[in-house]
Image (spheres, grey):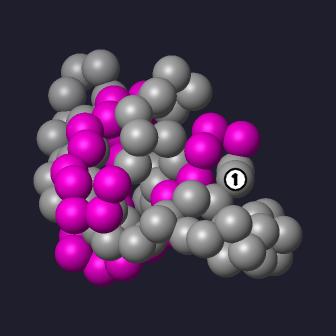
Amino acid sequence: MATDFKLNALLSLPKNFNEKLEVGKTYTIQKPDFRIMPFNIPMELSTHDHQYLAKVKVKELKITTDGTQVAFEVLKIFSPEEAKVYTDNFI
C-alpha cells in the first residue's frame, strides 16, 4: 500500500488565515494531505484563491495524521504592482 504525497513549489494559505504578514516573522499553517516542499529556498506565497502575496521560505514541515504542518518565514512582501505581475502571469 502506498501513501500519496503532494510536491509543492508554491505555498498557499488556508482560507481561514487572517494574520497580518510581516517580513522576518515565522507563521505556522496546517495543510491537508501529506506535502513535500523545498526547505530554505525562496518560494511564492499566495492566498487560497491564488492572489500572490510574498516570497517565503519553509523552515519546518511536520507530517501528522491530519496532514502537514508548515512553518514558513516571510522574506519579502510584494508591492501591489509586484503582486499583480505574479498573479496575472503565474496562474
Residue 10, visible in the rendered structure: no
Tell me where the magenta segment starts and ends, as one range: 22-49
**Magenta-span inclusion, residue 35:** yes
Residue at screen point 36% across, 66% down:
56
x%, y% of residue 78?
A: 55, 70
Local crowd size for mark 1, using a 10 Å CA cut-off: few (<14), some (14–19), many (≥20): some
Q: Position of residue 9 (x, y in %)?
A: 48, 67
In the foreground, 74 or 60: 74
Relative side of 85 to 44, left or right: right
User: Residue 51 in the image: x percent, y percent?
Assistant: 70, 53
53 to the left or right of 33: right
Name the residue rendered at 52%, 48% in the picture: 12
| Residue 17 is one of the magenta-drawn residues | no
Q: Quadrant of residue 69?
A: top left
Q: Which residue is mark 1?
A: 51
Q: Is residue 57 visible?
A: yes
Q: Which residue lies at the image location 73% right of the left edge and 75% below the top edge?
A: 81
Using the rendered view, name the quadrant where residue 84 is placed: bottom right
Based on the displayed image, in which of its 4 quarters is residue 67 positioned?
A: top left
Q: What residue lies at 22% left-to-right and 64% top-to-bottom?
A: 24
Question: What amino acid is at disc 1?
Answer: Gln
**Residue 34 versus residue 51 in the image, above or below:** above
